[in-house]
């Protein structure tokens, strides 16, 4: 006969301080569903946030009396303002170009006036030189006539 022993589960060998075996490590497949669940929860939270935002926006539009027509009119006004702003920019650029052209014209006029003054001075100097030459010629003729009369 055999002796009657204790029946039941056998005790596992090794204590709690031993290294974890493969059965205690989390599996890759186990992480993926929790990440997928977290991603799905985040997606649902974002959808709920957007729906709440849309609802709030709709309520605010109704409270403020914003209709499709008033929004279209406002958009048209904005487009007009943008167009007028662009026209103003062009006009400012033209005015700046005109101002630069005016400055260049004034500079050219000043240079031309300077050249004219120089030309007048040169003319006056030539006239004076011609008058002096004429006076010398007359004096020489008078001296020659006087010398001829003496002879």
Image: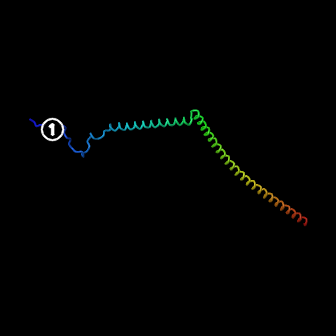
**Residue that carries the numbered disc 1 in the rendered image:** 6
Q: Is residue 133 above or below residue 51?
A: below
Nearer-the-camera pick, 21 or 107: 21
Nearer-the-camera pick, 150 or 39: 39
Q: Which colour style is shown? A: rainbow
Q: Quadrant of residue 47?
A: top left
Residue 89, given in percent of the width and then of the height, sits at 63, 43
**Residue at the spot x=79%, y=57% of the render?**
124
Count of numbered circles in the view = 1
Position of residue 6 in the picture relative to residue 35 (left or right): left
Position of residue 117 in the picture relative to residue 89 (left or right): right
Which residue is outermost to the left?
1
Position of residue 118 in the picture relative to residue 11 (left or right): right
Q: Quadrant of residue 150?
A: bottom right
Q: Is residue 116 above or below residue 33?
A: below
**Residue at the spot x=59%, y=34% of the render?**
70
Q: Is residue 101 above or below residue 57?
A: below
Residue 41, given in percent of the width and then of the height, sits at 40, 37
Q: Quadrant of residue 115?
A: bottom right
Which residue is outermost to the front?
63
Q: Alpha-carbon neighbours of circle 1 within 10 Å: few (<14), some, or many (≥20)?
A: few
Nearer-the-camera pick, 106 or 5: 5
**Residue at the spot x=34%, y=38% of the render?**
31
- What kind of element bears circle 1? loop
Residue 81, given in percent of the width and then of the height, sits at 61, 39
- The quadrant of the image that shows the N terminus is top left
- The quadrant of the image that shows the C terminus is bottom right
Residue 75, given in percent of the width and then of the height, sits at 58, 36
């Amino acid at each position: 006969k055999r002796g009657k022993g204790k029946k039941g589960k056998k005790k596992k060998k090794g204590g709690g301080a031993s290294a974890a075996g493969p059965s205690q490590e989390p599996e890759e497949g186990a992480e993926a569903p929790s990440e997928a669940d977290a991603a799905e929860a985040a997606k649902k939270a974002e959808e709920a946030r957007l729906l709440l935002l849309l609802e709030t926006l709709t309520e605010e539009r109704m409270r403020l009396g914003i209709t499709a027509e008033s929004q279209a009119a406002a958009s048209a006004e904005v487009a007009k303002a943008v167009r007028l702003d662009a026209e103003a920019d062009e006009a400012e650029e033209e005015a700046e170009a005109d101002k630069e052209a005016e400055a260049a014209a004034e500079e050219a006029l000043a240079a031309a006036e300077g050249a004219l003054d120089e030309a007048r001075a040169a003319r006056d100097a030539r006239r004076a030189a011609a008058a002096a030459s004429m006076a010398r010629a007359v004096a020489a003729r008078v001296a020659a006539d006087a010398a001829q009369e003496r002879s």
